[in-house]
Image (cartoon, coloured by chain):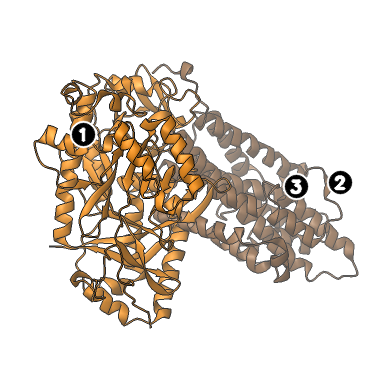
């Protein structure tokens, strides 16, 4: 596979997953904010603050205080200067897809292109007026269907594995950011429930545990579940296996810094208990995971998309 | 009811669908009957769904004059253009003959130059051509094939005769519209096909792949073939992706390739992989910064050396532009006589050569009747439509012709044929041309996949997409 093509698959996967996550986080919180009492504005402000923290990528905390729902929507969904906004991620996803059009199936391309054409026609004011849920769910649904359509129409070769690597890396990254942004010391059940919803996990959680979530139960499920497809553990395992399918090295061994880092992360999630996470602090644990994933992204780029110089080649 | 209105008579040109008395020509009779039975709303909803499908699929081209990267759907008219088996076989034979002669000419001017030594074409005309490539002199190419893909533009005069308007021997585009138009029309308007047996177009990519495999350097059973594109901002990028995907080969940009020891490699996630054949959709000028445009970032440094060493095949060959230079065009009938010892089956449009004093004087005296074309331009740019031009425009061309006569040719205005086209719910006659594609490695193939371009503006005679042109599905009927 061409390095450029592999790189586009990787970033296509990351941006598809990020657009989906940002849309989902906004939608969940819009829905929650509607039930908050207007007499307690501090709670709504705290809610939007946490949304900006996990979906807004807004830099120092001071700059994101005092946000309102509509400012949050504009920044996280429609600001073209914010590289994580829905409009930016959809544009970047589409630009990457365009560069590898001949490698994509027509079905995958069309799904991305149709969403792109739709998003380009929207603006913050119009979406806010008709209630943002319709727009946000559309983005979420279409981006989720990219994954399903790619799965069922593309050959599961190297391109597919790079797409998977990008998707699961971003999914784990967003999960880590969401855990980091939720203040588990607050409001017990309500906040745990919000955390689960932002990770698409409320029904899977209750099906697996048959009880209402205490804070640590929710974190345990989201971080350590072996079978839930958005848990950190699940994502790391999928990435590890995709990387090994690309390199041909047996799982459990490594041939590159990316594979070594993944092996270590995999061991952390396979053999860490929730008590150990609680002792370290949930927020600290989540931010360590996020930093590891940032380094992992550099490792993947370095191993497979290097800017080769002619002189370095002994052809 | 859809208004099926034959063009107003008397018209100066021929209509593809209607006789002079307003009745449909025999091949169009069934189509006219089908259209007659449709309500306007039905047709409009077919048109809408086809346009939506084309936009969703991204069947677009990029408009350079607009802000960077504006994508538009190439306007598509649902009324097909029909060619009978008989008409097509005449075109097929004429194109085959012409492409053989053009190819023989290229082999000759880059080797023995017999046609120049025997004085059949003035040496100056060839050597002054912007696209004559001195680096190709003495270079042997696989199978002596230069023009692997040609697009020969034909127009139909008022007597119904097809004439060659120009040859495209470099990187002719448009085949993707042929494939997509057919697909869109079959899906969106199946009723039209009911009474017809139309020859399929969808094997074009397979045929092209066959040509590319045939020219691979010897010794490799499974040659590595790639399509080289200038990138996503090129106006024909959609076509490059379609051909690569349908042939099952990699679509690459210049930065994906590198040359070491005169061998071309792909940069892959598993290291370097040798490349054998490049179907390049980049002009000669941008292929290799060592030889051509030094500041080109689209090309591949060292590619020409690898090519000249015979380690990689390029389609089309380098230097084919001398054969479709507009100043060389008027000699193509002579090429056919010289190399094939045959009379041309398809005629040229009469052409004045501005380097010949008497002809230039005639051109300058008749600027208000003639079409003047820049010898090196394409895409409908750099052209003067004398009868429709202002006196300022004519004077500007007069000065340019006097300054550099080699750069201009002139032709009488040909009243090209029209075809009924859906404009705001009414069928109106609009001018059309025809671009059949020819493929060549060991023999010339002319797949029944031709592009009909249509000038959508009323009265316009210019069909190029950059000048407000659209396209139609072109039906070659089974014999």
Near-viewer residue (A262 or B393): B393
Answer yes or no: are tags 1 and 3 on the same subunit: no
Chain letter for the part of the structure drawn in brown: A
The residues bearing labels 2 and 1 have C-alpha atoms spaced at a distance of 71 Å
Task: Identify the residue shown where x is 41% and y is 35%.
Answer: B401
Q: Say if A122 sits above or below B111 in the image.
A: below
For mark 1, give the secondary structure.
helix
Residue occupied by mark 2 = A62
Count residues near mark 3 (Cα–Cα under 10 Å), then give few for <14, some for 14-19, many for 20+.
many
Residue A136 quadrant: bottom right
Quadrant where the N terminus of chain B is found in the figure: bottom left
Near-viewer residue (A48 or B352): B352
Residue occupied by mark 3 = A282
- Tell me residue B150's x, y (percent): 27, 42
The residues bearing labels 1 and 3 have C-alpha atoms spaced at a distance of 73 Å
Mark number for residue B364? none
B330 left or right of A169 in image: left
Circle 3 or circle 2, nearest the eye: 2
- Tell me residue B471's x, y (percent): 37, 58
The residues bearing labels 3 and 2 have C-alpha atoms spaced at a distance of 22 Å
B30 left or right of B467 in image: left
From this viewpoint, is residue B277 visible? no
Mark number for residue B103? 1
- Tell me residue A97's x, y (percent): 49, 48
Chain B hue?
A: orange
């Amino acid at each position: 596979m061409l390095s450029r093509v592999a790189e586009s698959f990787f970033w296509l996967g990351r941006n598809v997953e990020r657009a989906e996550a940002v849309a989902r986080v906004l939608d969940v919180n819009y829905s929650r904010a509607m039930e908050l009492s207007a007499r307690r504005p501090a709670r709504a402000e705290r809610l939007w603050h946490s949304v900006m923290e996990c979906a807004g990528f807004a830099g120092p905390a001071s700059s994101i205080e005092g946000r309102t729902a509509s400012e949050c929507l504009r920044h996280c969904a429609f600001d073209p200067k914010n590289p994580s906004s829905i409009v930016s991620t959809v544009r970047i996803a589409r630009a990457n897809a365009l560069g590898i059009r001949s490698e994509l199936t027509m079905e995958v391309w069309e799904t991305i292109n149709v969403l792109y054409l739709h998003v380009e026609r929207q603006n913050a004011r119009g979406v806010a007026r008709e209630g943002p849920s319709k727009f946000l769910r559309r983005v979420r649904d279409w981006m989720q269907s990219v994954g399903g359509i790619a799965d069922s129409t593309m050959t599961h070769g190297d391109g597919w594995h790079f797409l998977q690597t990008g998707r699961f890396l971003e999914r784990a990254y967003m999960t880590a950011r969401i855990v980091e942004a939720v203040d588990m010391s607050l409001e017990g059940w309500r906040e745990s429930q919000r955390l689960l919803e932002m990770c698409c996990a409320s029904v899977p959680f209750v099906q697996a545990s048959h009880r209402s979530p205490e804070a640590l139960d929710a974190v345990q499920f989201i971080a350590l579940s072996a079978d839930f497809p958005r848990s950190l553990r699940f994502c790391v395992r999928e990435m590890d296996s995709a990387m090994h399918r690309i390199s041909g090295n047996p799982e459990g061994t490594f041939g590159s810094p990316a594979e070594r880092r993944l092996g270590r992360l995999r061991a952390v999630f396979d053999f860490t208990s929730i008590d150990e996470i609680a002792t370290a602090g949930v927020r600290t644990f989540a931010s360590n995971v996020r930093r590891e994933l940032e380094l992992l992204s550099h490792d993947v780029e370095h191993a497979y998309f290097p800017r080769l110089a002619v002189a370095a080649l002994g052809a | 009811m859809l208004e099926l209105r034959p063009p107003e008579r008397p018209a100066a040109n021929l209509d593809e669908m209607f006789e002079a008395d307003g009745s449909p020509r025999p091949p169009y009779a069934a189509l006219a009957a089908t259209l007659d039975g449709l309500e306007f709303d039905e047709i409009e909803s077919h048109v809408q769904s086809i346009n939506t499908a084309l936009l969703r699929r991204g069947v677009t081209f990029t408009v350079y004059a607009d802000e960077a990267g504006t994508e538009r759907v190439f306007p598509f008219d649902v009324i097909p253009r029909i060619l009978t088996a008989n008409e097509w076989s005449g075109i097929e034979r004429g194109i085959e003959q012409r492409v053989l002669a053009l190819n023989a000419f290229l082999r000759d001017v880059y080797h023995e130059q017999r046609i120049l030594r025997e004085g059949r074409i003035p040496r100056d005309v060839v050597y002054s051509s912007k696209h004559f490539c001195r680096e190709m002199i003495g270079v042997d190419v696989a199978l002596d094939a230069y023009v692997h893909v040609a697009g020969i533009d034909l127009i139909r005069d008022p007597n119904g005769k097809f004439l060659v308007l120009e040859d495209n021997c470099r990187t002719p585009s448009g085949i993707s519209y042929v494939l997509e138009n057919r697909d869109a029309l079959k899906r969106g308007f199946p009723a039209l096909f009911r009474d017809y047996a139309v020859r399929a177009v969808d094997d074009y990519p397979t045929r092209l792949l066959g040509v590319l495999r045939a020219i691979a350097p010897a010794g490799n059973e499974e040659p590595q073939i790639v399509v080289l594109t200038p990138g996503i901002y090129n106006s024909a990028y959609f076509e490059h992706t379609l051909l690569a995907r349908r042939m099952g080969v990699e679509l690459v940009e210049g930065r994906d390739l590198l040359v070491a020891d005169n061998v071309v490699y792909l940069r892959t996630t598993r290291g370097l992989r040798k490349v054998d054949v490049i179907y390049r959709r980049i002009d000669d000028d941008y292929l290799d910064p060592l030889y051509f445009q030094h500041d080109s970032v689209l090309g591949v440094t060292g590619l020409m050396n690898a090519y000249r060493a015979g380690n990689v095949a390029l389609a089309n060959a380098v230097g084919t532009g001398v054969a479709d230079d507009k100043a060389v065009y008027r000699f193509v009938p002579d090429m056919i006589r010289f190399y094939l010892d045959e009379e041309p089956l398809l005629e040229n449009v009469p052409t004045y050569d501005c380097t010949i004093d008497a002809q230039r004087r005639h051109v300058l005296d008749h600027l208000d009747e003639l079409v003047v074309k820049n010898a090196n331009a394409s895409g409908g740019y750099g052209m003067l439509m004398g009868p429709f031009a202002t006196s300022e425009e004519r004077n500007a061309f007069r000065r340019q012709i006097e300054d550099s006569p080699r750069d201009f040719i002139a032709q009488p205005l040909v009243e090209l044929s029209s075809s009924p086209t859906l404009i705001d719910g009414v069928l109106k006659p609009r001018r059309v041309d025809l671009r059949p594609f020819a493929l060549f490695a060991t023999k010339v193939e002319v797949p029944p996949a031709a592009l009909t371009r249509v000038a959508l503006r009323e009265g316009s005679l210019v069909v190029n997409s950059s000048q407000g042109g659209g396209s139609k599905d072109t039906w070659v009927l089974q014999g």
